[in-house]
Amino acid sequence: MIVLQSVTKSYGDVRAVDGVTLAISRGEFAFLMGTNGAGKTTLLRLISREEQPDAGVVLVGGGNTAELSGPSLTRLRRRMGVVYQDTRLMPNATVAENVALPLRVRGMGGSSVASGVTAVLERVGLADKKARFPRELSGGEQRKVAIARAVIASPEILLCDEPTESLSAERAAEIVDLLLDINADGVTTVVATHDTGTVNRLRRRVIHMDSGCVQSDTLVGSAAPSLPTNGPS
Amino acid sequence: MARLHVARYLLGSAFTGLWRNRTMTGGAIVTTAIMLITLAGFLAINDTLNQMVTALGRKSNLIAYVRDEARPTQVTAIIDDLRTRPGVGEVQFVSKEDALAIFESRFVDQRDILDVLQSNPLPASVELRLNNPAVVPELAQELQAMTAVFDDVVVPLDVVEEVIGISNLARVAGSVIIIALTGVTLFVIVNTIRIAVFARRQEIEIMKLVGATDWFVRGPFVAEGAIIGGIGAGIAAIALVVLYAQAAPVVTRIVSFLPVSTDTDFVRNLAVFTLLVGLIVGSLGSYFSVRRYLSV
């Protein structure tokens, strides 16, 4: 589903991603682990084609993302849902309007949008807050709205950047359970995090990054040992 | 059906966007209105000044005195020819008898002078009222060359040259100021809209990242720009009509010696022009302001 071959990306003198090669299968759930500056966010931005590699190839669904532009890039974006670290909710739009956006851009309207929004907000537990503005919600609730927006149009791929950052253990667990639930529907899910507690709790693939390189790629909780629980850094 | 949903959504989004960003919207509307009032006001002033200069030019007269021995058929032919010349408004033949009658009516107290004379000493003349003072020197030279017909040609050349100078200066200065003011107006309006779009650049980025086409993103912003430009221009147009209605009688009274037209057609056309400028600049300003944030 997602393949990176010798991908390199630099910002000035800083090499954010350095020769990364990896493959993530359809329907898989994978954690991208690493400290701040390890290259997790850049890797997600390369997959979502917010950035283009300086070298190497990023393939999504078999297509080279570097060759996409205009309508073909729009089609790729519509196959993905992305939960950004800063949520990127529209501040002047209500929860319902934020969540409905992916359906609106597909030309949908009327009752189909309203029912879709209600269903996804019920799934994330925010059905009673659809008329609120993002500033009226807690950090955890904003993350849930961002997740709802990312999954409302039934994407094939879900990319999440630090979805549990700054949340209490209880709220973080809620978010992760929600992501597992979405993944259970067959959505390929990649979650960037440095929350080792969450990672150790789950038997999932962990791609550990450091200084832009993949340091290890293991299934935590099975053959590989648990990661040291150093908490969020 | 999808297109209908999209069109309804885009228009709804435009109005919602305007309302939710009402401080920015209000600022943009007021700025647009002020700039367009300034531009349209200057256009009105410039038009009035041009009319005054043109009217002043029409005051330019040329008088050619006819020799007593000139043949009437020759004079008539010259008058017919002069009437076809560009820049010539009115051509009038004043006979010797007419000249005497005019003299008598103007100088009632000095009728005794005429009694002393045995015959009418006043010459017949051809009087030209000119629309364009620029043709006067050439015309005067041409008539002066007809020595068999005309005895003398009287023309206030210094006044004519003065009028031509003022007229040219007014036109050049007016054009320069209008071009500069138009440029400043467009610059200020477009930048006001750019600031409004800049404040919402994240919104544009988000729309693109969830798979919106460029037109889906542009649509509400272009509609918002047109609405801002339209409302601002509407305010300017109303202010212009009201101010013109107040100022026109005053101007007419001050320059009552000149036939300056302060008709409603002009101000109506100017109001429509202002409205169109507002709509076009508003929508195009938004179109180009959004473009730079679409390359996500």
Image (cartoon, helix red, strand yellow):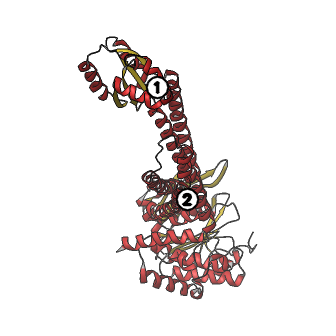
Chain holding disc 2: B
B278, A24: nearer the viewer: B278
Chain holding disc 1: B
Which residue reaches farthest left?
Answer: B73
Is disc 1 surrounded by few (<14), some (14 to 19) or many (20+) residues within 10 Å? few
How many numbered markers are drawn?
2
Task: Indicate which disc residue A208 carries.
Answer: none
Residue B133, by quadrant, is: top left
Is disc 2 surrounded by few (<14), some (14 to 19) or many (20+) residues within 10 Å? some
The amino acid on which the numbered mark 1 sits, given as a three-letter code, is: Arg
Q: In the rendered image, which residue does mark 2 sit on?
A: B239
The amino acid on which the numbered mark 2 sits, given as a three-letter code, is: Ala
Above or below, comparing residue A168 to residue B254 in the picture? below
Q: Secondary structure at mark 1?
A: helix
Above or below, comparing residue B278 to residue B3 in the picture? above
Query: What percent of the width, then of the height, locates residue A10?
Result: 62, 51
Inspect this view and state whether residue A61 appears. Answer: no
Q: In the rendered image, which residue does mark 1 sit on?
A: B111
Left or right of residue B138, residue B178 in this image: right
Left or right of residue B247, residue A135 in this image: right
Quadrant that contains the N terminus of chain B: bottom left
Query: What percent of the width, then of the height, locates residue A99?
Result: 53, 77
Q: Residue at x 72, y 75 (%)?
A: A166
Residue A196, by quadrant, is: bottom right
Inspect this view and state whether residue A232 appears. Answer: yes
Above or below, comparing residue B72 to residue B240 in the picture? above
